[in-house]
Image (spheres, rainbow, N blue to C red):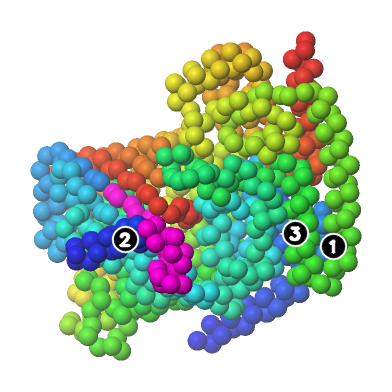
Amino acid sequence: MIPKCLAALSASVLFVALPMYLRAQSTTVTGVSRAANPAISANVLYLAAVSLGDSEVEGEHAEGGDEHGEEAPGANVQELELRLTSFVDPHVKADITLSTHGIAEAEVEEAFVTALGLPANLGLKAGKFLAAFGKHNPLHTHRYPFVERPLAHEDVFGEEGLNEVGVELGWLLPVEWYCELVGGAYNGDNPILFHSEDEEDIAILGRFRNLVDLNDATTLEFGVSGLTGREEESRTRSNVAGADLTLKWSPLETQRYKALTIQVEYLHGDMRDNTRSGGYGFGQFRLSRRWWVQGSYDWVTEADHTTSHTRALVAFVPTEFQALRLQYGATSAKGADTDHRISLQYNFTIGSHPAHAY
Amino acid sequence: MRRLAVLMGVCALGVFIGSRTGWGLRVVTTTTDLAALTRAVGGEHVDVHAIAKGVQDPHYVDAKPSFIRKVNRADLLIFNGLELEVAWLPLLIEGARNRALTPGSAGLLDASAAVNRLEVPLGEVDRSQGDIHPQGNPHYLLDPRNGVLVAQLIGDRLRQLDPAHADNYAAAQVQFAAEMGSRIEHWEHRLRAMGSISLVAFHRTWTYLGSWANLRIANYIEEKPGIPAGPRHLAALVDQVTAENIGVIALAHYNPTRSAESLAERSGARVVVLPAAVLAFDDVATYPDVFERIVSVFEGWEVAGSD
């Protein structure tokens, strides 16, 4: 996969340098134009982690089939993400996100098109993308509220999250508040939930999302999600249900200086022969323009075995293009020592100005 | 399945009723200034809603899904442009799924098309220069002459989208231009009486105002656009304000006051908060009110300065 990533990078360098050289010439003659190049942005996440004491919990949990996405202690590139966005034509917009895990492998994280101007308040997304399940799953790594994903998301959706090839149709209901119904159909190929060679076996998602303004500064969002897909090998069906609640507050006069987000999300998955459930609750408070403090609790239960994770985080955000975050996390499970971990994460974004999702 | 059909039927009815109850063209603007100008030329034939409130810094507005509802129902979306709303408007438009607002359609109006831009960077632009606007300074509506030009542009678009009331819009355009013309003449007269005013600003908010009102903007509290001042920059500002005998630090109503107050304390200059938008304060309710207030404040400190 590395050569592909390098090829993409060198291609973008070429696309910048070559047209400069050729600028004097007409593109009608050369056929080389950068006028319609996609908007490019890159985000890099660095992570340094120190584990204080034994990492017994991690080992214990690893027996359950997976690790919790925590990087090995020491300094690492957590992820490099390269994003290309452009209109294909007047009807379709395309987004491509290439990402690396560390520096060892690269992959197509997302590659999807969004249809523009559909009738009846419909929105259509097709390709490979992070599915619209709940609040945390659609987030890219650099948008995670904490350094790692919540335990329950890791254990129910797998390391990559629910990131499938398929289509999603969203409908904005014509009511006074923001109310959206999303239906998704995917070629189910998730390492934990479903896998099938049969092309008729598709995974189906439904999401219902509501957001109301309590006042100018405060919004309350409530959503429920459901997912079902078939696992060919074990001839079982995997079902996941989720619910989420988000309260956001930010006074209009000081939107850049004060903000509060409180979010809870619960997941329940019935898959193969086991049941996994869990969730998280976190609070994020913006103290000033550059400083945030956050805390979270999350847990996952599998066969009466519960692992829980408590985190506290301080973020220093000099501009919207970089952030330095220091996190303390304690992971504990019954019958094992608590793992204490300090993580320092740095990220930056260059290129096309990203809009800020609410 | 039947329940779903009933639900869809109810919603379809909702759309039908919803589309019947609105009067006139539904216009959404990103700012209160654009809303005020739209009301001035649209009158009773338009139903105008501004996304950012007057008290907000229009660079930083949360892209709340509730705004997506508003944009979803708009016949016309008027925005400031020059990347003022780049951090939030694209998400609202994309989320709104409004066929009238697909890129390039007549339902989208970039108001900056009407004006001569200032501070368009020459040469390479990158973020080492801070939050620089590559297409030019976006605060053009703080020159009242630009307000007239933008109102004409909006009126033209209203005539195109709502030909039934074209005559009303045309008459309102003429009336607004005439009214603003005489007000501008009056403000200019009062400004000339004061001579040139030197000030330190927080952000590059007053560039257009300055070019109209003959302000000398000596420096900025922000080291670079969008980048807060460090102690060294503040110390240099104190020296400059003292040396050049600058009497005023002019903040926009949404700027933070702390660094300005510290500068004022150390240099002897005064902090003055000016309205940078319609509805910045409750009593700045119309577009002309903005300039009436600014010119009055200037006159006030002229008097104070001569004491």
- The answer to which of A243 and A169 lies nearer the viewer is A169
Q: Nearer the viewer, residue A101 or A219?
A: A101
Separation (CA) of disc 1 from disc 2: 51 Å
Queried whether the magenta region covers residue A229, the answer comes back as: no
Give the amino acid at mark 3.
Ile
Quadrant hosting residue B219: top right
Residue drawn 16% across the image and 58% down it: A104
* Amino acid identity at mark 2: Leu
Rendered view: B276 above or below A278: above
**Residue, disc 3:** B154
Residue at 14% from the left image edge and 52% from the top image edge: A58
Specify start and end residues of the magenta stretch as a single range. Answer: A19-45
* Chain containing the residue with disc 2: A
**Labelled disc at residue A14:** 2
Is residue A44 located in the magenta-colored stretch of the structure? Answer: yes
Disc assigned to residue B169: 1
The three-letter amino acid code for the residue at tag 1 is Tyr
Labels 1 and 2 touching (C-beta < 8 A): no
Q: Check if mark 1 and mark 2 are on a common chain.
A: no
